[in-house]
Image (cartoon, rainbow, N blue to C red):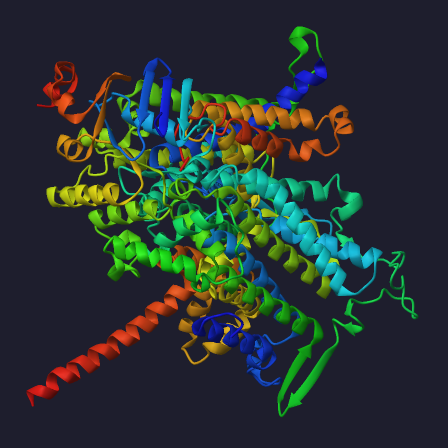
Amino acid sequence: MDAILLQILNGLDKGSAYALIALGLTLIFGTLGVVNFAHGALFMIGAFCAVTLQRLLNLSYEVVDETQTDFLGNPLKVKTPYVEAWFGPEFGGAIIDWAVPLAILFAIPIMIGVGYVMERGLIKHFYKRPHADQILVTFGLAIVLQEVVKYFYGANPIQTPAPDALNGVVNLGAAIGMDIVYPVWRVVYFFFAVVIIGGIFSFLQFTTFGMVVRAGMADRETVGLLGINIDRRFTIMFGIAAAVAGLAGVMYTPINSPNYHMGMDFLVLSFVVVVVGGMGSLPGAVLAGFLLGILESFASMNEIKSLIPGIDQIIIYLVAIIILLTRPRGLMGRKGVMED
Amino acid sequence: MFGLNKKDTSLLIIVACLTMFAPFILNPFPTDSGLAQFNAGYPDLMQRFVIFGIFAIGFNILFGLTGYLSFGHAAFLGVGSYSAVWMFKLIGMNVIPAIVLSVIVAGLFALLIGFISLRRSGIYFSILTLAFAQMSFNLAYSVLTPITNGETGLQLTLEDPRILGVSATADGSIPVTNLFGLEMRSTFEMAVGPWAFQFNAGYYLCAFIMLAAFYLSIRIFRSPFGMMLRAVKSNQQRMNYTGLNTRPYTLAAFVISGMYAGLAGGLMASMDPLAGAERMQWTASGEVVLMTILGGAGTLIGPVLGAGFIKYFENIFSKINDNVLHSWFSFMPDGMEDAVVFLIHPFIGKGWHLTLGILFMLVVIFLPGGLVEGGQRIKGWIQGRRAKDSSTAKETNPAE
Amino acid sequence: MGILEVKDVGKRFGGLQALSDVNLSVKENSVHAIIGPNGAGKSTLLNCLVGKLIPDTGSVMFDGQSVLGRAPYEINQMGISRVFQTPEIFGDLTVLENMMIPCFAKRDGAFELNALSAVLKQQDILDRAEAMLVEMNMADKRHMHAAALSRGDKRRLEIGMCLSQEPRLLLLDEPTAGMARADTNNTIDLLKQISDERDITIAIIEHDMHVVFSLANRITVLAQGTPLVEDDPQNIRGNPKVREAYLGESA
């Protein structure tokens, strides 16, 4: 029982990441009708927003402290981050410690900006082109973005720790008399994802803006005929989708140290998630994200691996293939989406 | 000639000349000159040109003709490599059985994957092929280690049985791949003045096979089968209502292109007898997509050009470093020189992929027909100018 | 016994009963029109005949064989060709190639891996395609891309492609929809000529009464998914039920 609960939890954090990326992909696909192979790169850029903020906060000046010496007997150079100098060691230190959560604020405007530029500068010109062309150009863009990041940050993963307070483990089972020890940050990640997903859904559900966007997703032409400038709203949705992917990346950094090709790794899986959930269905994307995350984590249990060797490596793809062949529209897909 | 029309025959002859004289053409700079590093006429690189050419030609039969964009073709290349290395381990070092087996195994594998994937079209087909390729890659890394040797990759050892050959040579080393005794690595060097040209047995084997593959692809393009594939791309609905079953047509195209990929994989292993799972990764599949699109999908020569172009510049760009740049721009004033070098720096050396990505985007945006379309546009522009010149000349003449 | 026999066909989409108790008999070598107001189920019926949809109940027999459960290409190979409302042709191919493909389908069946012989060496196919182009009056456009043709020419090409398969039944789905008057009249003349000169049955779904009464020698009126009446054109004109359901509404 403990083991099963633990596996479900383990699946939730990866599932959260899948769900967030797939949600963004679906938003873009549903609104703009564009298959965005660069979405993984947006996730990666988000992660590097966290890295950047952390580096900015750690910018330091050096003072030679004559009272102390290093192991060679030379006077010790003491590095003090500017932030600590300005806000005092205590508060400044806390800011540095909380770099990753703070990066959310830092990343939102950046990601919306990146998304806006991408849509206006490139994607806009591909609405009328075949899906294959959209895949190809965004695939090219993904390579470019990833190489740019590699140029500035190098090829190695960069450690980006969570705040100390959230770095430990917590026994989630204590209340119900079970022993389920789980890293705090992963719990945080899950709740973060739930909040974001809830936010997006209520935004689409309860605001006029969201209503127009949903109407546009269902029938773009009619909404256009009503004299509503649907394109501008869609551009904004692209920005929002980029921000969602970026935030998923920011918060993922303590779980997996970011590197330049993390986007590509997640992209393939996210596409699989979208297809399983059903192209164009937002609830489908979220459901499939969590479902596949949990399935993957179950498949990596030793009991199951000894039963079917290698299942953990292929479970997601296997499920995707089965779903695509038996329910071509995915779990919750609508009729007629990309079927020609 | 060869059952081809005049235009196709001349195309084939041009490609044949280019491949046969590649050791000269790719080595334009004398060996001791500073530009010698831009020579590409050495066996290893030339082999890569033609092998990736075969891969791209095959991919083009699927994508160029039917429009089905597979993102999993590297899986067939990988399977071909593994099959070939196993032949070297079990049977012997002759490359012929290895290549034959790699084509057959890749074909069977493609039949299986194609049979399932082709039940869907469009983006769904792309995702299905991607999923299959990633699955194969993951399995090759993990459970299938007894067959693939996991992360290390499959290599030859002294303990291999090689029932038709020897486990080890007289001096106790692993035997090398050969074609009925002609070693693939054997290279004849010809020095002409300051130039040195290398003629490698392995390269010529690959080149002949590529020519055969290219010839076959011309025949397919010009055949009723090729026309049907173009019709599939143009309008599947009309195909169905014209009494044609599109599924076997696309499946045949998929299997043929899978066999081309397997052939490329088998040749790769024949030149250098090892095989690793990274050959099957989806980025490797992406590379052949890049080559085909960059050269010109759906054209005969496009994929060959694309493969050559990418492999050549990959090699050249990775060799350029800041010192080379400084020597190129040394005629400029110091500050300007540094600025220019600084600006170019991200695109060279390890930055080659950045250049490739940008180039690829530009091609997709502005030149959907790839290099071939670019060439045609330039030709059209020149002819247009000439026509204009002659027409203005004609107009002015009667006036006089 | 007609060449096409539709018996008790019903089709339901969710809560909508699109077709119910459709009975229809198309006589060999007739021109049979199926008319009806919008939403009467004409297109659904047509899709049931060509294998795009499978009816929930009833049977569809062509020349004594059931077409139900067969794929569109199999039904086509049985001898039913379909012309679409918007011309479905191979836009990326030349006019001549468009015409050759049905000839290949007629000669080689649903699939033939003819990968090594050159298209240009298939003299019998070339001859047939050229002959049909001449008959369709399009020989001068043989090397044009089909996508570049005018609407009227696309329609002619599509009809020609269907004819080159020598079908026994030609199904037309509003063949003159969206056409100018002159093009419509050309199409009517072409279809008349086809039905006079060839051993062929034509079933046509049409909105335009001018087309229907110029061509048809038998008419079925469909209303709300059920045949209202089946009769000769002159009787249909005077039928009060038809006026009420259809002509009155459109007039």
| Figure quadrant of the C terminus of chain B | bottom left
Residue at the location (26% across, 22% down)? A208
- Quarter occupied by residue A323: top right
Residue at the location (42% across, 62% down)? C123
* Picture layout, residue A112 above or below residue B316: above
- Quarter occupied by residue B23: bottom right
Q: Is residue A110 left or right of residue A209?
A: right
**Which one is in front, B38 or A310?**
A310
- Specify whether residue A187 is in view: yes
* Picture layout, residue A258 above or below residue C157: above
Farthest residue in the top direction?
Answer: A176
Measured from the top left, where is residue B120 in percent x and y? 50, 37
* Picture layout, residue A31 above or below residue B371: above
How many marks can you see?
A: 0
Measured from the top left, where is residue B164 in percent x and y? 87, 62
Measured from the top left, where is residue B234 in percent x and y? 38, 48
Q: Is residue C143 left or right of residue B345?
A: left
- Specify whether residue A74 is in view: no
**Which one is in front, A74 or C100?**
C100
